[in-house]
Image (cartoon, rainbow, N blue to C red):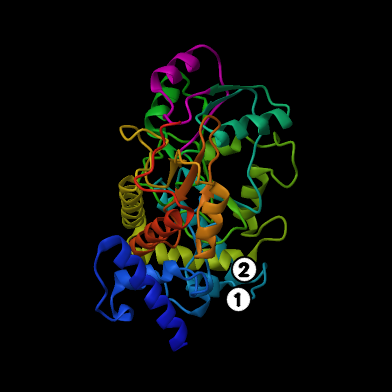
Amino acid sequence: MQRRFRSLWCKANKLLTANNNFRIVLNPWFHPPILRLVRCLSTDFPVGAPSATPAGGGGGDDGERRSKKLFTPGPLGVSPTVRAALTRDLGSRDGEFIALVKSIREQLVDIAELPAEKYTAVLMQGSGTFAVESVLILASGAYGRRMGEICLKADLPHTVVEFAENEPVQLSEVRRVVQSGVWTCVCVVHCETTSGVVNHIDEIGHAVKSLGPDTFYVVDAMSSFGGVVENYETADFIISSANKCLQGVPGFGFVIADKNKLKQCQGRSASLSLDLFEQWRGLESSGQFRFTPPTHVLLAFAQALRELKQEGGVPARAKRYAENNAIIKRRLKSLGFERFVPEDSDDGHIITSFKYPAHPAFSFDRFYQELSNKGQLIYPGKVTNADCFRIGNIGHLFPTDMEHLGDCIVQVLMDMGVPTPVSSSQL
């Protein structure tokens, strides 16, 4: 072990001497910046820098250190205590489980800051859907377009209005299109993780409701709910997942629905298992799912909700995510990386897209694999008109993790022979 540490120490010493004209005189194991550097130099060091953890989030353990850090839009990393909650068995018809489900549903409405007398939360083992007659989809990326694909497969009349992938949905165009027809339903993605763009759902909702008061307004808040302070009062249906900003594990989605609008969906679903109204009616009447529920996932989710509350609720979590985002933007800007979404536009703090460097030595496949070897998992790009990669800031990630990722990116670029600052001029 001493020989291995000495080898790493000499490697770090040589690197810093070559680049900074000084030698390290401190013991690296008691100097955090040098410790981060040595972690980046070693591919067999226990992967994943240790995270600072909020109250209730549990401390790091051996399993935590072995896990790779997930800088992705999902699935996301979770705390050790959320993972531990998965290990308990509980019957789906047990009174304790029924009470747990009831509590989760009430908390979700509370997190949305919506009145419980008007709104309800419906948990679905899969995606929730309902039949509509004429759907208007406002798409600024792949996930908005996916709504159109769902409508196409379900043989639902629909219109997709597309916007630039690096700009939010334009309110003036929303007004024009809504006025041009009669729409049963208008759908929009809150945070389009294709690029990171955040759409102004409250303003869009007011425009939709002022022009069509009876129109269903559906917000896909899959990647933003619980991690962005938002006003949802104009939304009739808010769709999200256990494993995004609420930091549970994958296994179910949920819909927070206006009860009166939900009742209008009765008998209109073309699917047995995805009938949102019947799922709600079952949960209301017996407290039970109609089909086998993901019991372990819900136990973990209950723990995740406790940790959200202990952290300080949505405002505190949004603040942490924003800090994560600010760090990685600062670090990559200092290296010359260009963001896909213009700096004067709103790309929020959920995920950020960066353009590839214009250097022949840069290969995203190698860049990704070298970072993965160091325990850092980023995400490939998904936009259609530029070569990009994405870095997410949500889940069980903290500022120390973002700094560590930045250090690893510096080392990987050096190993690839890509000089910094990089240039993205070819894009």
Near-viewer residue (89 or 423): 423
Q: Secondary structure at mark 2?
A: helix
Q: Inspect this view and state whether residue 214 appears.
A: yes
Residue under label 1: 87
- Name the quadrant containing residue 266: top right
* Residue drawn at point x = 53 percent, y = 76 percent: 63
Q: What is the x, y in percent for residue 304?
A: 47, 64
Q: Earlier along the polypeptide chain: callout 2 or callout 1?
A: 1
Q: Is residue 86 left or right of residue 175?
A: right
Residue drawn at 65 percent across, 60 percent down? 288
Q: Name the spot of residue 17 as percent of width and height, x first.
A: 30, 67
Find numbered disc 1 in the image and state the secondary structure of the residue it sits on: loop
Q: Is residue 59 visible?
A: no
Report which quarter residue 86 is drawn in.
Answer: bottom right
Residues 226 and 95: in front is 226
**Between 329 and 296, which is closer to the camera in this rendering?**
329
Would residue 87 be counted in the magenta stretch? no
C-beta proximity under 8 Å, tags 2 and 1:
yes
| Residue 67: image location, x then y, percent | 53, 69
Name which quarter of the figure residue 169 lies in.
top left
Q: Vertical placement of 230 versus 243: above or below?
A: above
Q: Which mark is residue 296?
A: 2
Residue 21 placement, left or right of 116:
left
For marks 2 and 1, give the CA distance: 7 Å
Quadrant housing the C terminus:
top left
Query: Residue lying farthest bottom?
Result: 2
Check residue 294 in the rendering and tell me which mark sits there, or answer none: none
The magenta-colored residue range is 162-191
